[in-house]
Image (spheres, rainbow, N blue to C red):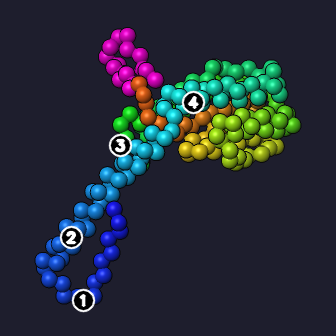
Amino acid sequence: MERLTVVVRRRALRPVALGLLAVMLTGCPGRGEGNDMESAQAQLQARPSYEAAEADYLAMLNEMRAAFNAVNPDLLWLDKPGVFNEGFCAPPFSDVDQAASANYDSGDAAGELTPAQWEQAAQGVAAVGARHGFTHVERLKNGPSQFYVVLHGRWDDKVEFGYEANRVVLSVYGACFIRTVPATPYDPFTEDATPSS
């Protein structure tokens, strides 16, 4: 919709003109919201599906773990990569049908890294991230005993990883995508019900 520009040249506007102006102005947001909704839908449709993005996130986490293991093979990963939180999308995607986002955890690792080993691992992890679209590197903590890096992706998703007190942390905070397979609602009153991703 083209922008509506109203120029008021006199204080005394007729009541009919004021009423017409009010209708015109209050009508615009409704059409704008529709346009915003269509824009949000189009943006998400241009992205991979939720399922494809999830598979890529998990594959990336495995590659990043391998980058740490290349520096210190003795790192002990406490769990396999998986979803630790999922839910609805934030605006402007909150009203798009089947839109969802999730966060993913690598399982963390116990073991020792020297500052030189950390730097080598951080460069390896950043290289993996870049291949998956996480191209902006932000170092929040850089020693001597705490290290923390954020990799920013193309859709406001991000990878966070760090090292402190002999522990490696590595997580992905995912973007919003459209599910191609609707999630199965979790029913806590059904004995065999299990949450579905």
Q: Which residue is mark 3?
A: 95
Q: Which residue is mark 1?
A: 10
Q: Amino acid at mark 3?
A: Asp
Element on which disc 1 rests: loop
Q: Which residue is mark 2?
A: 22
**Residue 14 vertical placement versus 91 (above, below):** below
Element on which disc 4 rests: strand
Q: In the rendered structure, does residue 107 fall within the stretch colored magenta?
A: no
Q: Which residue is mark 4?
A: 104
Residue at the location (60% across, 30% down)?
A: 57
- Name the N-terminal-most of marks 1 and 4: 1
- Name the N-terminal-most of marks 4 and 2: 2
- Name the N-terminal-most of marks 3 and 1: 1
Q: CA distance from mark 4 to mark 2?
A: 48 Å
Residue at the location (65% across, 41% down)?
A: 134
Q: Please state which of the two labelled residues, at mark 4 or mark 2, is closer to the viewer.
A: 2
Q: Amino acid at mark 1?
A: Arg
Q: In the rendered structure, does residue 188 fall within the stretch colored magenta?
A: yes
Q: CA distance from mark 1 to mark 2?
A: 17 Å
Q: CA distance from mark 3 to mark 2?
A: 28 Å
Magenta segment boundaries in residue numbering: 182-197
